[in-house]
Amino acid sequence: MAQITAPAPTRAYQLIGYSFAALGTTLFAIKGILIKLAYGDAGGAPAVDAITLLALRMMFSLPVYIVIGAMAWRNHVRSGNEKIPLDVLIVSIAVGIIGYYLSAYLDFVGLLYLSVQLERLILYTYPMFVMVLGAIFFGYSVTMRGVLALLIAYAGIGVIFGGGATASGEHTLYGAAFVLTGAITFAGYQLVAASVVRRMGPWLFTCVAMMTASAATLIHFSIVHSPGDLFTQTPRIYWLVAVMAVFATIMPTFMINAALGRINAQAVATIGTISPVATIIMAVVIIGEPFTFIDALGTALVLIGVGLFTLADARRKRGAG
């Protein structure tokens, strides 16, 4: 019997994938802008604190993940897949808390003290921590190109701290420490999550991780606030959080997944370069953050460093395959 092969993807099919990746990446970039708008600047005191804002974001997006999770579970059972072992479920819960609660909370706190532009650049370097943590805990190899890319990227951040307008705040180092820690925990999440995703499937895993992260966030909130405080915010806060949940959480998640179904992961990662650029444009236009030649130089170094790392990692994976 002749073997039937799937037709090669058409150019239009791939272009849709690139479009999804570009739009999804850009939507992710607006998160920091919305957080800053929610914090406001009334005499320096934020209009809402980090855990309240994060709890509201989870509360708005959680129903969608519950519905999609139920559908994914039904499909998992109907497809005759193996029963998900308890240890796999426990790991998915743990990494969900680390990746979607802890990393997000650290990022939200960091944005109290840090410009949106610098926050995005620091987060953008997380793939390099995947390399470092992978080498320390999983025995992955570290390449000279990867180390060089890491040095270039952090030289760029050093340039910004040395004289950039986006790093001129009084507590910038404090905020950067929170965001950097969030980037490290998210890198750890990515390292552990990969094996769990293969056992559960991406849709079911994402929903389980998001639901458990939401539970952790709401528990944190209930420890430091009264539960009723979620319902006493201003209409402006609710509108901003609703936009954040729909346009900077749910929609980009599905768009990136759709892009991965049409183009490879390396292409999606490369298109991810749009994220810090889009953030810079929106930060300058919407919330009036400064952007000087020093900031541009530092940003260029970060983009070059992460770009080199992405290309080197893609080449390494092709060679391993």
Image (tube, rainbow, N blue to C red):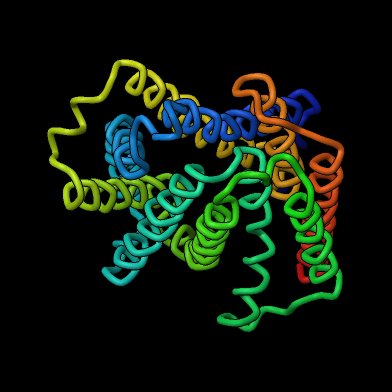
> Up-down: is 280 above or below 105?
above
Where residue 234 sits in the image (x, y, percent)? Answer: 28, 19
> Up-down: is 95 above or below 260?
below
Q: Residue sitting at 32 percent across and 22 percent down?
A: 238
Q: Residue sitting at 35 percent across and 42 percent down?
A: 72
Task: Assign the C terminus to one quadrant of the image.
Answer: bottom right
Say whether residue 11 is left or right of residue 110.
right
Count all numbered tags in the image, as a single digit.
Answer: 0
Quarter holding residue 276? top right
Q: Which of 200 and 43 is in front in this view?
A: 43
Where residue 101 sits in the image (x, y, percent)? Answer: 37, 52
Where residue 92 sits in the image (x, y, percent)? Answer: 36, 61
Q: Which of 186 and 165 is in front in this view?
A: 165
> Up-down: is 131 above or below 58?
below
Residue 298 seen in the figure: yes
Q: Which of 135 and 29 is in front in this view?
A: 29
Residue 68 seen in the figure: no
Quarter holding residue 32? top right
Q: Residue sitting at 65 percent across and 79 percent down?
A: 135
Where residue 108 sits in the image (x, y, percent)? Answer: 45, 45
Say whether residue 136 is left or right of residue 55.
right
Say whether residue 215 is left or right of residue 72.
left
> Up-down: is 236 above or below 69?
above
Q: Which of 263 and 183 is in front in this view?
A: 183
Q: Residue sitting at 45 percent across and 53 percent down?
A: 106
